[in-house]
Image: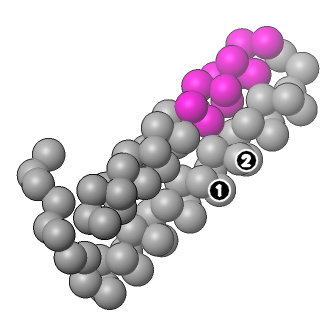
C-alpha cells in the first residue's frame, strides 16, 4: 500500500466514509444471517463473509488513524 497522505481531502474522506458504511453494514448483516440460518455450512459461510468485511473496516480505520 502506498503511504497515506498527511491530509485527506473532503472528497477522499467522504469516499472512505461510504466504503466503511457499506462494509460495516455487510458485516452486520452477514453476522445476523449466520445466527438465523440453521444449516451449519451456510452459517459458517456467513460468518466468514462477516469477518472479511470486518477486516476491511479495520483497514479503513487504520488509514484514517495514519492520516491523523
Q: Which mark is residue 29?
A: 2
Distance (Cα) linking label 1 and label 2: 6 Å
* Image location (x, y in percent) of residue 30: 69, 40
Helix or strand or loop: what does disc 1 sit on?
A: helix
Callout 2: few (<14), some (14-19), or many (20+) C-alpha neighbours within 10 Å?
Answer: some
Question: Residue at 56% across / 64% down in the picture?
Answer: 21
* Image location (x, y in percent) of residue 9: 25, 83
Query: In the rendered image of this protein, does residue 56 appear above or below residue 40?
Result: below
Q: In the image, 58: left or right of 27?
A: left
Which region is colored magenta? 40-51
Residue carrying label 1: 25
Question: Residue at 36% across / 77% down in the picture?
Answer: 13
Q: Which mark is residue 1?
A: none
* Image location (x, y in percent) of residue 37: 86, 27
Q: In the image, 6: left or right of 65?
A: left
- As drawn, which residue projects farthest toward the left? 2
- As drawn, which residue projects farthest toward the top? 40
Q: Quadrant of the C terminus?
A: bottom left
Amino acid at each position: 500500500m502506498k503511504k497515506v497522505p498527511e491530509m485527506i481531502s473532503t472528497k477522499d474522506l467522504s469516499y472512505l466514509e461510504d466504503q466503511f458504511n457499506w462494509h460495516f453494514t455487510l458485516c452486520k448483516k452477514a453476522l445476523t444471517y449466520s445466527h438465523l440460518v440453521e444449516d451449519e455450512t451456510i452459517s459458517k459461510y456467513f460468518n466468514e463473509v462477516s469477518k472479511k468485511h470486518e477486516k476491511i473496516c479495520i483497514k479503513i480505520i487504520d488509514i484514517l488513524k495514519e492520516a491523523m
